Amino acid sequence: MHNFVFHNPTKILFGQGTIEAIGPETRAWGKRALLVYGRASLKQSGLHQRILTSLRTAGLEVVEHGEVRANPLLTHARQGIDLARARQAEVIVAAGGGSVIDTAKAIAAGVPAAHDVWKFFTGKKSLKSALPVTTVLTLAGSGSEMNSGMVLTNGATGEKFGFGHRLLHPKTSILDPLATCTVPPNHTAFGAIDAISHLLEFYLTTADPDTPIQDRLMEGLIENSMTACDRCLRDPLDYHGRANLMWTACLALNGLTAAGLGRVGFPMHLIEHSLSALYDVPHGAGMAVILLGWLKDQQQTLAERIAGLGRRLFALTEPDPQLAAEQTIARFTDWLARVNAPLSLNDLGIPAADIPRIADNTRGLARVWRLADFTPERVAAILRRCLA
Amino acid sequence: MHNFVFHNPTKILFGQGTIEAIGPETRAWGKRALLVYGRASLKQSGLHQRILTSLRTAGLEVVEHGEVRANPLLTHARQGIDLARARQAEVIVAAGGGSVIDTAKAIAAGVPAAHDVWKFFTGKKSLKSALPVTTVLTLAGSGSEMNSGMVLTNGATGEKFGFGHRLLHPKTSILDPLATCTVPPNHTAFGAIDAISHLLEFYLTTADPDTPIQDRLMEGLIENSMTACDRCLRDPLDYHGRANLMWTACLALNGLTAAGLGRVGFPMHLIEHSLSALYDVPHGAGMAVILLGWLKDQQQTLAERIAGLGRRLFALTEPDPQLAAEQTIARFTDWLARVNAPLSLNDLGIPAADIPRIADNTRGLARVWRLADFTPERVAAILRRCLA
């Protein structure tokens, strides 16, 4: 096991009926709040009004910054920063999924900064302070509700970059599974796939062969991502299915799974970010495609590891590592097909001829993330695995 | 899944070479420290000097309060409270295992209180404030380094009681596996057994049948407690074995395993506390005996649950739940025998004739913990299962 620091101070309030705690939890951090949210769904579900009422009842002045979209945009975060400054917001409240929470974090980081917020993402500036963030989660998947990371898309440069800092941990995150019961099947599945992709990034890029604690934890969470997703698709109102998916996705990327693994890479995210930046595909949909391509790419090199995963997850009995790895990938493919995820670039409507352009787009993030092995040539080879 | 609050703000610095961080980490909380530790081992290993040097180099004035013993005493914690007050300590540093950390927490809770610290344990007073605590862990097992609980023995009344409060989370805990390499085999095993007992308390007393995330997590941690302990016994200097045991025991009782389970009981601890209070047996040794008795007691009622655990842990293929539960208990017994743990009250030198006295001793804690089902008669029946 490698040395690590684990410090996750986010307070989680989990379960039905917890939404109304957002007022008092937020009031603890200030009296002027910027409420960040997305498009139609929050208002349709009635959550927008409940949250506003809770915040105001707790004595908060609320300014609203809605219209966050999937693959959230830097320009929109910048508008939020201007608005928060103009209205002297002391705390940022996010009500939504990963895109909304990431936008809220970007605003929280940007308000006290004397420079443009994008400089954090490009590694040109380091974060010194940030406004506090509280969240109400409405979509399981990204894990942003209990971690210090955020991802934004710079539409002007076609870059989708990520940045993380310990000051960006939400102070309190409210996870009410009922708030996710209206998420449609495809986005429910994309969220589960996102969680699985986080776990597989760690599971397959760790160079430490001696991490049985983390391995069991990751295997359990991958298993639960699939079984909980299946339950939610069978019955969107299955509370415990929603609860299991919500807590699984949260634990998948809250720092615990990676603690002790040493340096891990995020090669699948590197490539998917370019898909989302260039084609605006939902992150989870892009991940499904890249995940299969990456597994096929790694099938020989990591046969033993992938086979071990399959034996734990799918009770495979095949002794040969290569064959067991192949069976494991087949099982993941079957599951992705069952939840109606795209399985290839073609399913995403992206032609093979675009591969060089996508591969070229990964250059910037590969530099920032120091993934020097992932040259455009290497990325193109992986993308060709995503064609079939 | 039940509603829950999860909030664990303890910062963990894990790995070799982290001991020297204790100075700066502690200095962040004050400039006068009370250093709490046990008896000979800390000085023999040289850790005492390293910690003192680190604290002083960071600019701290240090007052020492050594001589904490296993099954730590209320009287000794009271002395620490007096000393901390007299020297105006602002922060308490624990360097040791669970007994030392628990004593440090009791001092931290007692210093600002206007009444005797024992009133927290008997439920007569609620905690309003506490001094900050930092820790250097030297024995894996209790989990106290990352949780809000503590256990003390009141020698005058023969009561071993526990108390927990969110203000008692250590601010920073330093987990250097090298600091545990000198722990002798029996105490290494007792620590692993302690971790397993925490997990089994949750696993077997949860009334919620729908907690697959927590189940996989607990099963993984039980498995790792055993395999890591085996490694440490084979080779006390096996760094990764020590590391795995240390992190496993920490995660077993840091709030994560129980989050979502709803109300859980601590029946094994209820009974073991009486063994330790009356006979001063090491906690882990007592737990080994009670654990087997409790499993036998629950074998019929919880056959399906125990069988499921055995199938996951030991790859049992027996389809009949009763038989599979029996096999699971046999596997635990075999493992405990292999690590030279006591298997019966007799192995602890406690005669069957003492059962009524032990059972009677559990009354007080059963009341405080609201374990109304655990009458002395019920406890005596469980203790009779611990005879063979």
Image (cartoon, coloured by chain):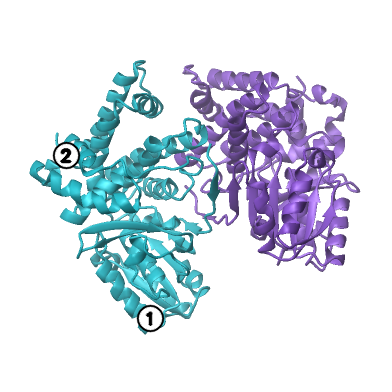
Chain colours: A cyan, B purple
Q: Nearer the viewer, mark 2 or mark 1?
A: 1
Q: Give the CA distance from mark 2 to mark 1.
A: 44 Å
Across and down, in percent, residue A32 comes to: 44, 80
Same chain for labels 2 and 1? Say yes or no: yes
Determine which residue is flagged by label 1. A85
Tell which circle, 2 or 1, labels the residue nearer the N-terminal end.
1
Side (left or right) of A161 relative to A10:
left
Task: Give me the chain letter of mark 1.
Answer: A
Q: Determine the residue positioned at 34% across, 42% down.
A: A196
Task: Give me the chain letter of mark 2.
Answer: A
Instruction: Give me the disc on residue B225.
Output: none
Residue A52, above or below B309: below
- Of residues B276 and A81, the one nearer the viewer is A81
Residue B173, above or below B341: below
Q: Quadrant of residue A319?
A: top left
Q: Quadrant of residue B42?
A: top right
Determine which residue is flagged by label 2. A344
Residue B95, above or below A320: below
Side (left or right) of B2 relative to A317:
right
Q: Is residue A84 visible?
A: yes
Across and down, in percent, residue B50 comes to: 74, 47
Across and down, in percent, residue A356 comes to: 14, 45
10 Å crowding of disc 1: few (<14), some (14-19), many (20+): some
Q: Is residue B367 visible?
A: no
Name the amino acid, label 1.
Answer: Arg
Q: Determine the residue positioned at 76% across, 58% down.
A: B56
Name the amino acid, label 2.
Answer: Ser
Across and down, in percent, residue A174 comes to: 44, 61
